[in-house]
Amino acid sequence: MDEEKTELFEDAEVKPKGKTTSLTCPHCGGAIIIEKKSGGRRGQLLGLELPEMTDEQLKRELINSKSVLYKAKQRKADPELIAKNEERVSLALAEKEARAAADAPVEVVEEVI
């Protein structure tokens, strides 16, 4: 029965959509192909501006920008690159603060005359 199943897979031609890895089963010697779909682009890589991002995308952008800045400082990158990364972090923080201010409850004060 196992031979019938492997024959079905041997005849099939499937074009992979992402990266593939081929393995050989140590028990039966059959070939196993594992396909890893390529991930989609997000945030700035997708071309979204900060105001267009969802809250979750903005959160991820802030994490990524801080990580890029940290790594640039650790490897003692060009000062221009570090300044660019610092600006990216500050823009993301400013957008986060602007959204927090917009979502904050408004205090209504009534004047009694």
Image: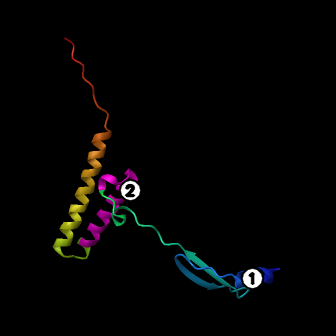
**Up-down relation of residue 22 to residue 73 (above or below):** below
Local SS, label 2: helix
x, y percent for residue 24: 65, 86
Looking at the image, residue 72 sits to the left or right of residue 4; the answer is left
Q: Tell me where residue 59 sits by quadrant.
A: bottom left
Name the mark on residue 37.
none
Residue visible at 32% across and 39% down?
103
Q: Magenta stretch? A: 50-72
Name the quarter where the N terminus is drawn.
Answer: bottom right
Residue 112, above or below 35: above
| Magenta portion: prevailing SS class | helix
Q: Position of residue 77 (x, y in %)?
A: 21, 76
Q: Is residue 56 magenta?
A: yes
Residue 96 vertical placement versus 87 (above, below) = above
Instruction: Name the amino acid, label 1.
Output: Thr
Is residue 26 toward the left or the right of residue 94 in the image?
right
Q: Looking at the image, which residue is at 24% across and 23% down?
A: 109
Image location (x, y in percent) of residue 101: 27, 41
Pointer 2: what residue? 57
Identity, as a three-letter code, of the amino acid under mark 2 = Gln
Secondary structure beneath label 1: helix
| Residue 6 badge | 1
At 24% from the left and 62% from the top, the residue drawn is 88
